[in-house]
């Protein structure tokens, strides 16, 4: 949105976090958002930041599928409204309270404790678990995905495949079906799984990984969505 000037001091006005007011960071003056600005804000809220993402696919048809649509809506919401890794993490933790199939530190932690040895053997000293996801009823403790503040870890039976957030160059929506599953860099061994029926947690996890990526490597290339 084009920068507006503060009539009191001439500073550039910025949107407040709630995006319903314009605020001057220099003198603290606040102003109501007019109709023109509201239209621009609505457009910003419905799209992804072009400084972070390069969209190379028409997702119109895919978004008509309930789970994929919710996944993409949540990705946009987390990027545009929550905006920071801390707020997205808090959003994810609150969402985990309503499911028995996902876990985090202090939430359904028994799932993590069952495979704690395998996970801890892969983590570095400054790494922490944000989400644990079993891949199925019959694969509990054998095949699961872990999201940390540094990377995704894909445990496949005796193997562990890693994808650091800073290495994410492409996110490819899995073709066919209604599940909101994405492949990192087109690698079928690095599938961000559909975490729960609505698809919303998958969108939040992707948003968090992307923000971590740019926080940890600000000058990196944009992430392609295909």
Image (spheres, rainbow, N blue to C red):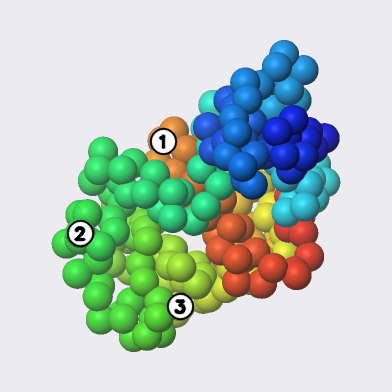
Quarter of the view holding residue 31: top right
- The local crowd at label 1, few if under 14, some if 14 to 19, many if 20 or more residues have their Cα within 10 Å, is few
Whole-angstrom CA distance, mark 3 to mark 2, is 24 Å
One can see residue 191 in this view: no
Question: Residue 124, percent across and down?
Answer: 41, 84
Q: Disc 2 on helix, strand or loop?
A: loop
User: Is residue 88 visible from the viewing direction of this image?
Assistant: yes
Task: Say which element carries label 3.
Answer: strand
Front in this rendered view, residue 43 or 183: 43
Residue under pointer 2: 106
Mark 3 = which residue?
160
Could you tell whether 69 is left or right of 198 in the image? right
Please report whichever mark, 3 or 1, sits nearer to the chain's N-terminal start: 3
Q: Quadrant of the N terminus?
A: top right
Q: Secondary structure at mark 1?
A: loop
In primary-sequence order, the first of circles 3 and 2 is 2
Q: CA distance from mark 2 to mark 1?
A: 22 Å
Q: Tell me how far mark 3 sits from mark 1, CA to CA.
A: 25 Å
Image marks 3 and 2: residues in contact by CB distance under 8 Å:
no
Image x and y of residue 130, in percent: 37, 61
């Amino acid at each position: 949105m084009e920068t507006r000037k503060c009539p009191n001091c001439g500073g550039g006005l910025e949107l407040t976090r709630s995006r319903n007011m314009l605020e001057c960071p220099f003198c603290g003056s606040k102003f109501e958002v007019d109709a023109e600005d509201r239209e621009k804000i609505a457009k910003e809220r419905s799209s992804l930041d072009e400084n972070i993402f390069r969209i190379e696919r028409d997702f119109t048809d895919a978004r008509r599928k309930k789970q994929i649509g919710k996944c993409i809506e949540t990705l946009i919401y987390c990027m545009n409204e929550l905006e920071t890794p801390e707020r997205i993490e808090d959003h994810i933790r609150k969402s985990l309270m309503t499911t028995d199939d996902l876990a985090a530190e202090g939430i359904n932690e028994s799932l993590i404790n069952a495979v704690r040895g395998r996970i801890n053997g892969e983590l570095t000293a400054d790494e922490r678990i944000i989400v644990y996801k079993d891949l199925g009823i019959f694969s509990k403790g054998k095949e699961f995905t872990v999201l940390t503040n540094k990377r995704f870890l894909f445990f496949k039976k005796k193997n562990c495949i890693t994808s650091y957030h800073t290495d994410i160059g492409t996110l490819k929506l899995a073709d066919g079906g209604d599940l909101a599953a994405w492949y990192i860099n087109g690698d079928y061994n690095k599938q961000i799984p559909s975490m729960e029926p609505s698809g919303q947690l998958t969108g939040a996890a992707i948003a968090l990984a992307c923000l971590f990526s740019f926080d940890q490597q600000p000058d990196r290339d944009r992430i392609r969505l295909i």
